[in-house]
Image (tube, rainbow, N blue to C red):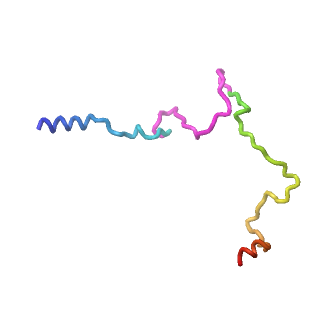
Amino acid sequence: MPLGLIMGLGRAFRQKRTASLDILSPKRAPRNFYKGKNCQPTGFHTRKGGYVVVQDKLPNYVVPDLTDFKLKPYVSQCPKEVKTAESAGATK
């Protein structure tokens, strides 16, 4: 009897895996917790509450010159069927 009581108390005080070990989300966190969306900062905050954008941290998109490009950027939802030699040979 005393051994069962001691083992029961031991089970009660044993550390159990709780929800606190799960990934911390804004719903389970304090009111001022902001998790973010895994974005990289583009600058830094100043001491007086301002924000300085660092140009090296901004994304730089390289777009080629498309002045003499044959294709148009718009694709119709109802394209016309055009039969070419490649498509005719592939269906046979």
Seen at 52% across and 33% down, the residue is 33
In magenta, the rendered stretch is 27-50
Q: Residue pushed farthest top?
A: 47
Seen at 87% across and 52% down, the residue is 67
Compared to residue 46, the image places residue 29 above or below, namely below
Residue 38 falls inside the magenta stretch: yes
Q: Quarter of the image containing the N terminus?
A: top left
Within the image, what quadrant is residue 89 found in? bottom right
> Residue 5, percent across and down?
16, 36
Comparing 8 with 88, the one in front is 88
Seen at 84% across and 52% down, the residue is 66
Compared to residue 66, the image places residue 52 above or below, namely above
Seen at 88% across and 55% down, the residue is 68
> Residue 55, percent across and down?
74, 32
- The reply, left or right, for residue 20 in relation to residue 25 is left
Q: Residue pushed farthest left?
A: 1
- The reply, left or right, for residue 29 in relation to residue 11 is right
Residue 9 falls inside the magenta stretch: no
- All told, the count of numbered labels is 0
